[in-house]
Amino acid sequence: MSLPVDKKWLYQPFSLSRRTNPFLIIMMGLSGSGKSTVSRWLTFELQAAWLCSDVVRKCLYGLNPEQSSAESGLDIYSAGAHKRTFSQLTALTEKLLCSGYPVVIDSAALRSLDRQQFITLAKALNTSFVIIYCMAREDTIKTRLHNRLQQPEEPSEATVKVMEQQKEWLEEPCAPEKPFLIRLNTDFPNWQGRLKEQLTPLGIC
């Protein structure tokens, strides 16, 4: 199947399903809250394209997903790098949606402005969208972050210190976002079933 974007931007191989009515899933939440795990599950469950901000950011700076930016001497987490990353995510999302592919955006999207870029795009394309806000207990998040950093092929470089800083950046969903919002506690053993129940009425699952 020919993709409308270079595969380097897409994290992990998967089977894509082209649709006449593609949809957009916008993930949000602190690092370690379960976004990537949920994104992986949604990608395979729904045969959607998976755009991971960590992968896109590293590709923009010539790094492979598993490479360390610090060891490479690059600052890829500045305000300018953040803006560049989300601009690229938006452009890739538009290409995929216009080609009929559903998209899952795996990013923290903590600021309202970050989420609004994707919402504006979805509305302009008359595309259904949902925001999935992942949450978990702090002890769970810290354990996940510690374990993740031990994995050699993990693209995320987030530490507990980064997560604590993210709390200052977090802007809770505002009133216009709430009709499209699903809050998901990934501490629940059967979060997949709970998520399916909420997505099904929207015609996504």
Image (cartoon, rainbow, N blue to C red):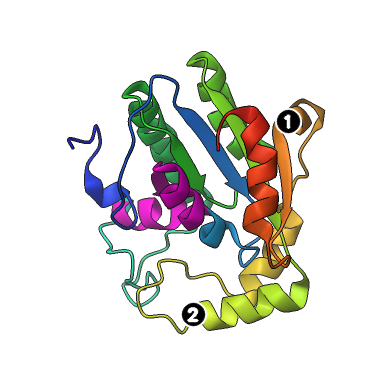
The secondary element bearing badge 2 is classed as loop
Residue located beneath label 2 in the image: 149
Which amino acid does the dot numbered 1 rest on?
A: Glu
Q: Looking at the image, tell me whether mark 2 or mark 1 is earlier in sequence order.
A: 2
User: Would you say residue 51 sits in the magenta stretch?
Assistant: yes
**Residue of label 1:** 177
CB under 8 Å between discs 2 and 1: no
In the displayed structure image, the side of residue 141 where residue 154 appears, left or right: left
Q: Nearer the viewer, residue 109 or 105?
A: 105
Provide the secondary structure element on which disc 1 rests. Answer: helix
Magenta-drawn segment:
39-59
Image coordinates for residue 76, horizontal then vertical, percent? 42, 59
Q: In the rendered image, which quarter contains the N terminus?
A: top left
Residue 200 appears in which quarter of the rendering?
top right
Q: Position of residue 159 (x, y in %)?
A: 58, 75
Q: Is residue 31 left or right of residue 59?
A: right
